[in-house]
Amino acid sequence: MVLTRPGFNVYTSSVKADGTFRFNSVLPGRYQTSIRSAGGYFVSKMEVKGSALRNGLIEIADGDAAAVAITASDETGSVSGYVKSGDQAVAGVLAVLVPAGGEAALRYRGFQTESDGSFDFRNVPAGDYRLFAIEDTGFEYSNADLVRPYVATAPPLRIEAHKASSQDIVLVVAKP
C-alpha cells in the first residue's frame, strides 16, 4: 500500500495476510492512496474515518488518527486503437481516457500516440469512460475544468474486466 503526497512524501506499507496495513508517523497533508502490485490491482473503494476524503484523496490534519478501509480489485481491462483525422492516423497527439462518472481526476489517463497513431491503455479499472484526443500534448488532462468541454462531446466507452478491446476506436482530433 502506498500513500503519496506529490512533491513531498511517499509512505509504503506491506499488506498483511489478513488484508490490514499500517502507516506510522504520517505528516499532515493531502495524500493519494494506491496499490503497487504486478497483478494490476487498484483501489476500487475507500472509506476514511477521522480524516477528510475528497476527490479520492485522504486529507490528514495535524494530530489526526485516520481509520481507512480500502477495497482492492483486479477487475481491469484495456482499450487500444488509433487516433485519426479524416482517413489519416495522427502521431504524437494526446489520447485522453476519462471516467464517465466524474471520478477523481487522478484516474484520468493520457497517452501520446505512437508514430502510427496508435494508443494502448492497459490495467484500466472496468467501467464507463469517455475517450477523446487533443493535439496539445502538454494539455493538463488531470484538470477536470479543462477536460469538461471535451468530455461533453466524447463518445462513451465501456471497459470490461479481464478483457482487451479488439476493436479500433477512431477518434476525431479535438483542437483546443
Image (cartoon, rainbow, N blue to C red):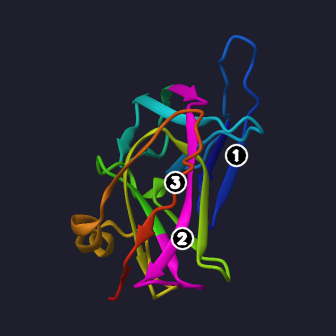
> What x and y, as percent, mark residue 135?
45, 87
Q: Callout 3, which amino acid?
A: Gln
Q: Which mark is residue 167?
A: 3
Q: Is residue 176 left or right of residue 48?
A: left
Q: Which contiguous range is marked in magenta?
A: 70-95
* Vertical arrangement, residue 75 with respect to residue 36, above or below: above
Snapshot quadrant of residue 86? bottom left
Spatial separation of the CA atoms under disc 3 and disc 2: 10 Å
Circle 1: element type? strand
Q: Is residue 97 left or right of residue 119?
A: left
Q: Is residue 31 left or right of residue 122?
A: left
Residue 86 part of the magenta-drawn span: yes
Q: Are marks 3 and 1 in contact (CB under 8 Å)?
A: no
**Residue pointed to by mark 2:** 82
Residue 123 in sight in this render? yes
Mark in front: 3 vs 2? 3
Spatial separation of the CA atoms under disc 3 and disc 1: 40 Å
Say which residue appears at 54% left-offset and 48% top-offset: 165
